Every structure is written in structure tokens, then in C-alpha cells.
Image: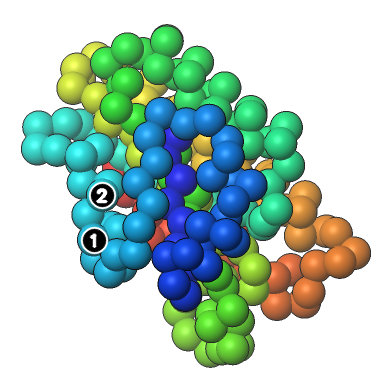
Amino acid sequence: MIIAVTYLGSEAEAISHYAEFLAIPSLMQDVKARPYPELNEMLNGQAEYGYRRVMKGSSFLPPLTVDYAESLFDDLLDFHKRVPDAANSAILLEWINPRKNMLVGQRDTAFPNRGKLLNFAIGTTWTDPANDTVCREWAREMGAKGRREVEKSQRGDDVDAVTKEGSAEYVNYDCE
């Protein structure tokens, strides 16, 4: 699972802001100030030439519950075990402060989420054409799981009206 976060401020402020998050054991942490294009380039390894791939987009409403986050991780590990050829597949939760997006009305531009919803990408990669169906289906299932969680979260009493109107899918990531 790849979690890419951004912080609009100094590196020291970001480390302080994400201290609890950074305390979670992980295989890798690469925390430093970097331009946004460099952050995007960090994900290129998953999209190397020669892979078959499909992406599915969804959204999520922070904060994630521990149970939901663990279920995403468990789903990914299970998929890797069932389809070893797809071991390069990943789930990407984009933690980007939505404050600036929220200054524009929900229906004023084509961007689907002007509330507090954040993007969630399912990047499925494999090499063997025999795995096409199982890999595409897994991506769709994970997208549907994300959509169900967002729709449940949007029904909360403490959710603002703009976030309630937001899309549970991020279609820029949908490609087959």
C-alpha cells in the first residue's frame, strides 16, 4: 500500500503534523520537501513498460477508520497471494489538504470533489494475459468497496453539504 501525503508548509512542520502517522511501522518512508511533480514521479515504478494494467478510481473521507484501512491492506495482501503475477499492484490514498479545492463550488468546474473527499486509486499491474479477468475484476471490486465506504461516510451528521454532494469515484483514474 502506498500512501503519499503532502503538506503546505516546512518539512519540520510536516513531520510534526504527521508524527502519529509516521510512527506506524512501514517498509519505507521517504519524507522530505519536494516539488509536486517529483511526488508524482515516485509512483512511476508501478507503471514500468511491459506490464498489463488497469486503474480504478474512488474517493475516501478522512479520517479513515482503522478497521477500514486494515481491510484495504488485507484485501491487497490477499490479492497478491491469489495472483502472484500481480504483486506490483498497489492501493494509493492521496492525502492532500482539500482546503483550496473547497473554495470553488461543487458544480463550478469539472473536478468531481470540492468537499473533503480525497482520491483513492487502485493500480493493478500484471504480465500474464491469463490474469486479465481476475485483475480487472479485483480493481472493480475495490472501487466498489471504496464507493460504498464513501456513501456511508457521506451520510454522517457532521458532513458538510458540499462533501455530501461529492462523487464517490474519481474517474480520471478509471482506465481499462
Residue 101: image location, x then y, percent? 53, 80
Measured in 3D between alpha carbons, the distance from the residue under mark 1 to the one under mark 2, in whole angstroms, is 6 Å
Q: Residue at x 23, y 61 (%)?
A: 38
**Residue reaching furthest to the right:** 157
Residue beneath the point at 56% across and 73% down: 98
Q: Quadrant of residue 72?
A: top right
| Residue type indicated by callout 2 | Met
Give the residue number, with chain letter if any, for mark 1: 38
The picture places residue 78, in percent across and down from the top left corner, at 50, 15
- Res. 148 visible in picture: yes
Tell me the amino acid under the disc marked 1: Glu
Classify 23 as above or below 115: above
From the top left corner, tell me how far across and down residue 173 is, in percent.
37, 54
Classify mark 1: helix, strand or loop: helix
Image check: 98 left or right of 62? left
The residue lying at 70 percent from left, 70 percent from top is 163
Classify mark 2: residues with Cα within 10 Å, few (<14), some (14-19) or many (20+): few
Residue visible at 36% across and 13% down in the picture: 83
Instruction: Give the quadrant of the C terminus.
Output: top left
**Residue placed most toward the observer, 51 or 32:** 32
Q: Position of residue 30 (x, y in %)?
A: 35, 46
Q: Residues within 10 Å of mark 1 (few under 14, many from 20)?
A: few
Q: Which mark is residue 100?
A: none
Q: Looking at the image, is 59 positioned above or below residue 90?
A: below
Q: As drawn, is 165 to the left or to the right of 42?
A: right
Badge 2 is on which residue? 42
Q: Would you say residue 139 is visible in this rendering?
A: no
| Left or right for 67, reference 106 | right
